[in-house]
Image (cartoon, grey):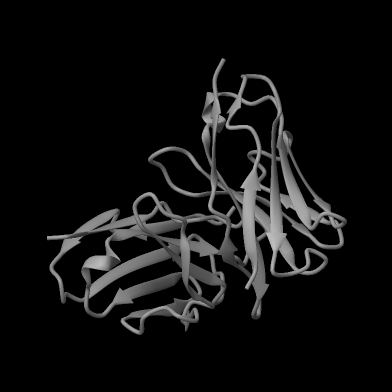
Amino acid sequence: DIQMTQSPSSLSASVGDRVTITCRASQGISSYLAWYQQKPGKVPKLLIYGASTLQSGVPSRFSGSGSGTDFTLIISSLQPEDIATYYCQNYYSALRTFGQGTKVEIK
Amino acid sequence: QVKLQESGPGLVKPSETLSLTCTVSGGSISSYYWTWIRQPPGKGLEWIGYVYYRGSTNYNPSLKSRVTISLDTSKNQFSLKLSSVTAADTAVYYCGHLAYSSGWYLDYWGQGTLVTVSS
């Protein structure tokens, strides 16, 4: 099974800060990686697929990069509405594992 | 735009079978992949499995012996059955739609339904 490990587990940043979340796969998954945002009490929402393709309607301050085993989600300028938990998911393997999540808070 | 809505009992007794249905609107179930994910209270997301419109399935090995996902094309619905439930199966259950772009990724989610396992 491919394990997905996110870091950090949580972070606190100021409005306007650049935020970086990483996701590491235990083996190569090419670019078959998606990122989701889950606001408190809400349904997860697709932000990025194919490691770097922004889903329609997602603000351009979100970006993704990486391939193989190491991936990054960047929020270029953190906004109050970005408070959420972010999950990566591998869709390379038959077992579609999620990372454990990264909780983003405002400092 | 595809919309999904989960339905089913919110309370299931231990050792019984959890049964949920996902109703699809805005698109035909006779295409694409359809999936179930769950999230225990305060915890992360766990992928349960998916069904292809032609009927083939793939399940999380940790649940495989207890789970069945199936389609009802006449009703544009797909369903989840999880047998021999315990308190550890208490979670919000989401159904979802997989889209294709060099791979099948989860794009649309239902609103989720909380299922509590308790006597």
* Residue at image location 44% in from the left, 47% down from the top: B44
Q: Quadrant of residue A42?
A: bottom left
Which residue is at the far top? B119
Q: Which quarter of the image is occupied by the C terminus of chain A?
A: bottom left
Of residues B71 and A30, the one nearer the viewer is: B71
The image position of residue B86, as x and y in percent, is 58, 24
Check the image and report above or below for B115 versus B16.
below
Query: On the rendered structure, is B20 left or right of A74?
Result: right
Check the image and report above or below for A73 versus A102.
below
* Residue at image location 31% in from the left, 67% down from the top: A21
The image position of residue B72, as x and y in percent, is 84, 52
Of residues A22 and A39, the one nearer the viewer is: A39
Q: Quadrant of residue B117?
A: top right
Query: On the rendered structure, is A24 left or right of B76?
Result: left
* Residue at image location 45% in from the left, 80% down from the top: A57
The image position of residue B1, as x and y in percent, is 62, 73
Check the image and report above or below for B32 versus A76.
above
